[in-house]
Image (tube, rainbow, N blue to C red):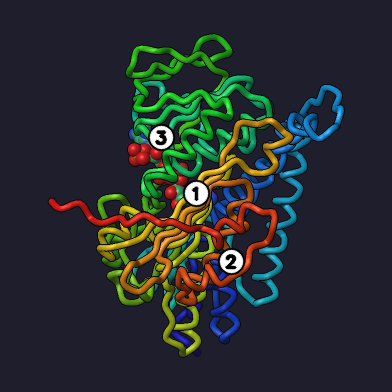
Amino acid sequence: MDKYDFDLFVIGGGSGGVRASRIAAGYGARVAVAEEYRLGGTCVIRGCVPKKLLMYASQFGKAFEDSKGFGWQVSEASHNWERLIRAKDTEIDRLQRVYEGLLRNAGVVVINGKATIAGAHEVCVNDVKFTARHVLIATGATPEIPQIPGAELMATSNDVLDMEHAPERIAIVGGGYIACEFAGIFKGLGTKVWLVHRGSTLLRGFDGEVREHITGEMAANDIEMRLASTVVAVERKRNAYLLYLGSGEILEVDLVMAATGRRPNTGGLGLERVGVDVDAYGAIPVDSYSRTSCDHVYAVGDVTNRLNLTPVAINEGHAFADTVFGNMSRRTDHAGVPFAVFSQPQVAAVGLTEEKARVMHGAIRVYSSVFRPMHAALSGRNERVMVKLIVDAATERIVGAHIVAPDAAEIIQGIAIALKAGATKADFDATLGVHPSVAEEFVTLRNGRNSTQPQS
Ligand code: NDP
């Protein structure tokens, strides 16, 4: 008789936790997973999946407008938010059942409730204590709201996905992934959108030219930009809200949405009982095998605040299970992970920004191109796409690729494979383009410029 109830107890049934559970169970481990809300986690229930469905819905508005230039005559189109949310919910329910089935078929015990660490090798859910040889924390992160007067009046991405009506006017606070994505969604669905960001360009951490470009494109798409703007307070005014800006301007809207970052879910987990460290941001520091400061406790996904992306959490969970239960030493390679912001247009990248590449490689060559996509020729839309490659001058290897364009996410995936394989600029040049496409620009870029680190 084993001295523990389970070989692995997973806290959190999101992308990382579910993958780790299934793989560990596949190796013969006795696994339990506790989830306090719905299996599937942020990505499936209130993140990537519902967001992408809403993004698809929002693109029709622009397509109807653009279709006129291609000879279509479209009578007045209208959108029914309630129907969209119902359809989205049906799909999310289906995916949740898929997740439940995956765990059931793998023999994983699913427990509904909030789990806390009760002591060494002990986890408590709904007042029942379980023992486990290993514990995996995969509790994700939760939206953070700026602490200003009236903060409680602001909605987050969690709330807007379940709203009963679409707002006619919305102010979105923040300039990151979620702010950019929801600005595009609401604009496309016919809402008047203000984007209030404290910085002067969107998407901090992205390539400088890319940031300038997407900021301009979103403004050209009739999103009212309030850049270098702070938010001071929110007030309710009958059925509307007033958002007070540092500039003195007051925006009257039907909804204020905070998209100002996400904080790791580590509060109330009992981590201190087993000596699991938490950093100043509330994230759990781990080594490259996702092991925390406590030997038998591991953590994967957003709760570790490494690279907060679903495929990364899945890979971390899988690598953990391979290492601890599969007798294989595996760790996630966090370098060269492609990523995309589903704004409109989309922003996607893999590898280094120009700024980082200069620091890491010294001399680099930069190839970039901004042009009017063919679609705009007939739609008449004032839009520009951007493609950029960064090449290490010493080795000729591509160290960064960036694109701002519709379907940028679909394009960057293939480019990421080339970078992983160590492709050089000559390899790109030797590849023929797919014509006519935006993506072909990646293999036709000429006349790079040298870019070196400014001497300090
Ligand atoms: P981000 O960290 O991407 O952006 C947060 C934004 O809020 C920044 O622009 C930041 O400004 C601003 N901000 C932070 N605090 C304040 C404040 N107190 N007052 C005003 N502005 C503030 O967070 P998101 O919430 O957009 O997304 C969280 C993470 O989730 C992302 O970083 C990403 O890892 C992941 N994600 C990934 C997606 C994808 O892969 N497509 C989609 C959605 C989320 P500043 O830049 O000045 O710090």
The residue to which callout 1 is attached is 369
Image coordinates of residue 154 in percent, x first then y, are 48, 27
Q: Which mark is residue 414?
A: 2
Residue at 50 percent across and 41 percent down: it is: 178
Q: Circle 2: is it few (<14), some (14-19), or many (20+) Cα within 10 Å?
A: few
Percent position of residue 235, x then y: 44, 15
Q: Amino acid at mark 1?
A: Ser
Q: For the residue labelled by badge 1, is the local secondary structure a helix, a strand or a loop?
A: strand
Mark 1–mark 3 Cα distance, whole angstroms, equals 37 Å
Q: Residue at x 53, y 60 (%)?
A: 310
Residue at the far top: name it: 238
Q: Compared to 63, does 263 lie above or below?
A: below
Q: Foreground residue, 430 or 152?
A: 430
Question: Would you identify the image quadrant in which residue 182 lies?
Answer: top right
Relative to 298, residue 82 above or below: above
Q: Earlier in the sequence, mark 1 or mark 3?
A: 3
Compare residues 390 and 332 and report the one nearer the observer.
390
- Which of disc 2 and disc 1 is earlier in sequence? 1
Determine the residue located farthest toward the front in the rendered image: 447
Say which amino acid is labelled 2: Gly
Mark whose residue sits in front, 1 or 3: 1
Circle 3 sits on which residue? 145
Residue at image location 57% in from the left, 19% down from the top: 254
